[in-house]
Image: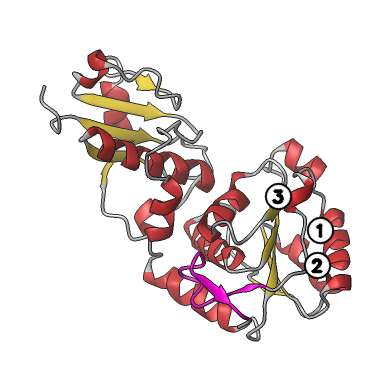
Amino acid sequence: MSRGEGILVAVTGRYHGLGNRMRVVLGAHVLAGLEGRSFAYVWPTGRGFGARLDELWAFDASRWPEALSRALAPAFPYRDASLEWIDETARRQRVWQIRTPHALALPDDAPSWHTELRALQPVERVRRRVLDLFGACANRPYLGVMIRSHPVAHDATLQASPVEWYLGRIEEIRSVRPDLGLYVAADTDAAFTRVARRFPDCFGQTDKGAYNSRRALQAAVADLYLLAASCHILGPHYSSFPELAQHLAGPAVALETSASAPWTRFEAQPELSVGTPLRPELRSPGRR
């Protein structure tokens, strides 16, 4: 088989979250380009995850049915994220199927899937929500806070990142920078309400719809961009969602969790201004 005749298929799991899905699909898209293969992806939807990828971002790659992927698996088995299986024998195979929740171990000199993420544009409904929410930040730098408190969250997340931890860190940070705004992206209205009672000037989204419904996932993508446009992110331990926001933001923004390294903690220093929340990695000196 000559180079360019094969296809690479990124296979996401039915119960994989948004962060896990995006890093696999975008990483595999990068790999397909490196290997000269066409690209497709499997993105199961249903009760556990209610939105297609093209209902969240403008993404025109071919989407395969889950049943087609399973039917081809005996002849073209699922591969892992290590990419150690790529050799000349593998390159002669017409179909590669990569099924994993993990980021692909791309070559060091390969483009990053983070760059692919930043190049995406949300669908129009999400774009409007992002811009409307950003306009509510009163034209000042703000702290981005992402809280996972829903019962379906991983036990490690719930135990290490209770709402009390966020309240304490917000209090500490605002004692140093009382001028900072506060954007709260919570996966339950109850968690948002607890923060709003302590900090009435916070802003964010509530009434997002059923957990992981299409409506909730579109709200979550808007949260991603608002978190990425902040000057610092407080996020839950052991969750890929705030990591996705930090990758969207780039190195100008640190992600701090209750278990992260000391260097991720907030430092009172001049922020770089975000021109548009739809490209939060593009920043310039000076305040908004």
Asked whether, in this view, residue 59 is left or right of residue 286, the answer is: left
Magenta segment, prevailing SS (helix, strand or loop): loop
Q: Which mark is residue 195?
A: 2
Q: Nearer the viewer, mark 2 or mark 1?
A: 1
Q: Nearer the viewer, mark 2 or mark 3?
A: 2
Mark 2 or mark 3: whose residue is earlier in sequence: 3
Residue 142 drawn in magenta: no
Q: Is residue 74 left or right of residue 142?
A: left
Could you give the CA–CA distance between mark 1 and mark 3, rounded to whole angstroms? 15 Å
Which residue has dot 3 on it? 150
Say which element carries label 3: loop
Look at label 1 and name its amino acid: Tyr
- Does dot 1 land on a helix, a strand or a loop? helix
Query: Which label number is shown at residue 166?
Result: 1
| Mark 2 residue type | Val
The quadrant of the rendering that contains the N terminus is top left
Q: Quadrant of residue 173?
A: bottom right
Which comes before the other along the chain, label 1 or label 3? 3
Secondary structure of the residue carrying numbered label 2: helix
Amino acid bearing label 3: His
Disc 2 and disc 1 in contact, CB within 8 angstroms: yes
Q: CA distance from mark 2 to mark 1?
A: 8 Å
- Which residue is found at the position 86% from the left and 71% from the top? 176
Residue 52 visible in the displayed image: no
Residue range of the region highlighted in magenta in the rendering: 271-286
Q: Position of residue 186 (x, y in %)?
A: 69, 60
Residue at (63, 85) in percent of width and height: 139
